[in-house]
Amino acid sequence: MLKYFTLLYGLAGYIIGLFTLLYMVAWLYPWSFMPTTIDSGNSKNIYISIITDTALILLFGLQHSLMVRASFKKWIKRFFTEANVRVTYTLLSSLFLAMIIILWQPINIYIWHFQEGFGYWFFTILYFVGWIVAVVSTFLIDHFALFGLHQAYKEFRGLKEPDSHFQIKGFYQFVRHPIQAGTILGIWATPQMSLGHLLFAITFTIYILIGLYFEERDLIKEFGKEYEEYKKRVPMLIPFFV
């Protein structure tokens, strides 16, 4: 019975996590078909909006930072199996991301605002390039493992996780973290950059850079000299800039 719960839990986490991420991607761009976007509504008080929006990003960052700590993983495994830990992380991340989308306070003061012409298409193309790179890069490693579905399926089938091996393929030959590189490009590339969107882009970029610092430290512990050599050869986020 437990293995069926694990599989259903993993499937639910994957669907909810993927939907929330895709919704956020669309929410960041001024699509006319979206019920709301990052700039929907009017800011009543710019200072309250800045405080509220910054607090939402901090909560999201704290949740991510806490749940990747070894001490927290050890504690949560008292209540969940190894396979369910990643799914729980995905579900809670989706919850905090949904809070950002729902509670975000727009600040409609525009730094640039293109509705047509070169500027509009330039930022729109960059937006698509960024998110395509981010999504494709998840499949270059293990897309389903990132959400926890892979782990749930393995436990359902009674299969053991194979030993991890260091591999370099696709975009990983040009930057060490193409998922994050694509994400940063995607959140900055908009034809309508409001002060609210700028706040989101800056705070989210800072969070990503802090996260990468700790991730790289963990990767060096796991793969040792092999990753250190890779780090010397390949830039972190921007191709050709080591």
Image (cartoon, grey):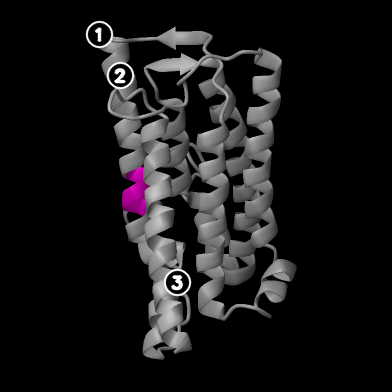
Q: Which residue is mark 2?
A: 122
Residue, x 37% and y 65% (percent of image)? 144
Residue, x 37% and y 27% (percent of image)? 29
Does residue 164 sit above or below 21 in this rendering?
below
- Secondary structure under badge 3? helix
Regarding residue 23, the answer to whether it shows in the image is yes
Where residue 133 appears, as percent x and y from the top left, is 34, 44
Residue, x 37% and y 44% (percent of image)? 22
The N terminus is located in which quarter?
bottom left
Q: Earlier in the sequence, mark 3 or mark 2?
A: 3
| Residue 57 appears left or right of 9 | right
What is the C-alpha distance between the residues marked 3 and 1? 46 Å
Dot label at residue 9: 3
How packed mark 1 is, by other alpha carbons closer than 10 Å (few <14, some 14-19, many 20 or more), is: few
- Secondary structure under badge 2? helix
Residue nearer the viewer, 100 or 126: 100
| Residue 49 appears left or right of 32 | right
What is the C-alpha distance between the residues marked 2 and 1? 9 Å
Q: Which residue is mark 1?
A: 117
Does residue 18 sit above or below 34 in this rendering?
below
Q: Are marks 2 and 1 in contact (CB under 8 Å)?
A: no
Does residue 196 sit above or below 80 in this rendering?
above
Magenta highlight range? 133-137
Residue, x 38% and y 41% (percent of image)? 23
How packed mark 2 is, by other alpha carbons closer than 10 Å (few <14, some 14-19, many 20 or more), is: some
Residue nearer the viewer, 26 or 230: 26
User: Label 3 amino acid?
Assistant: Tyr
How packed mark 3 is, by other alpha carbons closer than 10 Å (few <14, some 14-19, many 20 or more), is: some
User: Label 2 amino acid?
Assistant: Phe
